[in-house]
Image (cartoon, rainbow, N blue to C red):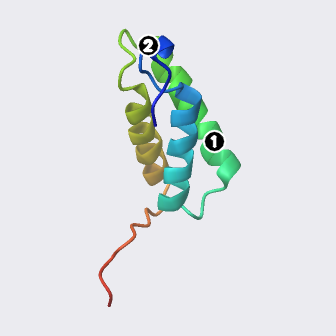
Amino acid sequence: MTEPAASGGLVDPEIALQRQIETLGQRFPDVDHAELSTRVHEAYERLKAEATVDAHLVAMTEKQVTEDLRSDGETVHVRSDDAV
């Protein structure tokens, strides 16, 4: 996805967070979409408040939410292209 030159080439964080919510929804299909959205936005805001550089906040947010979900006992579902 490309952004207008006036945006400095940066992707809108909300669009990027929505993508992360969708990705996490595929990896954690048993977790409610609203809960994923809440977790992603809260983690992003928490990381953003402490960040001095925000270039990797969305990736760090996904990692943090994934770790939190796994710590809470959620199972990661990984799509496999290998036929069994």
- Horizontal arrangement in the rendering, residue 72 relative to residue 59 (left or right): right
Of 44 and 8, the residue lying toward us: 8
Q: Which residue is mark 2?
A: 50
**Location of residue 64 (image quadrant):** top left
Tell me the residue at 41%/20% (across/down). Answer: 9
Outermost residue on the bottom side: it is 84
* Residue type indicated by callout 1: Ser
Tell me the residue at 44%/31% (across/down). Answer: 58
Of 70 and 32, the residue lying toward us: 32
Q: Position of residue 17 (x, y in %)?
A: 54, 36
Looking at the rendered structure, the number of numbered marks drawn on it comes to: 2
Is residue 74 in sight in this rendering? Answer: no
Foreground: disc 1 or disc 2: 1
Q: Quadrant of the C terminus?
A: bottom left
Outermost residue on the right side: it is 34
* Residue type indicated by callout 2: Glu
Is residue 5 in sight in this rendering? Answer: yes
Q: Position of residue 5 (x, y in %)?
A: 45, 16
Q: Which residue is mark 1?
A: 37
Q: Are marks 1 and 2 in contact (CB under 8 Å)?
A: no
Q: Secondary structure at mark 1?
A: helix
Q: Secondary structure at mark 2?
A: helix
Q: Is residue 58 above or below residue 19?
A: above
Q: Residues within 10 Å of mark 2 (few under 14, many from 20)?
A: few
Tell me the residue at 66%/52% (across/down). Answer: 33
Of 67 and 8, the residue lying toward us: 8
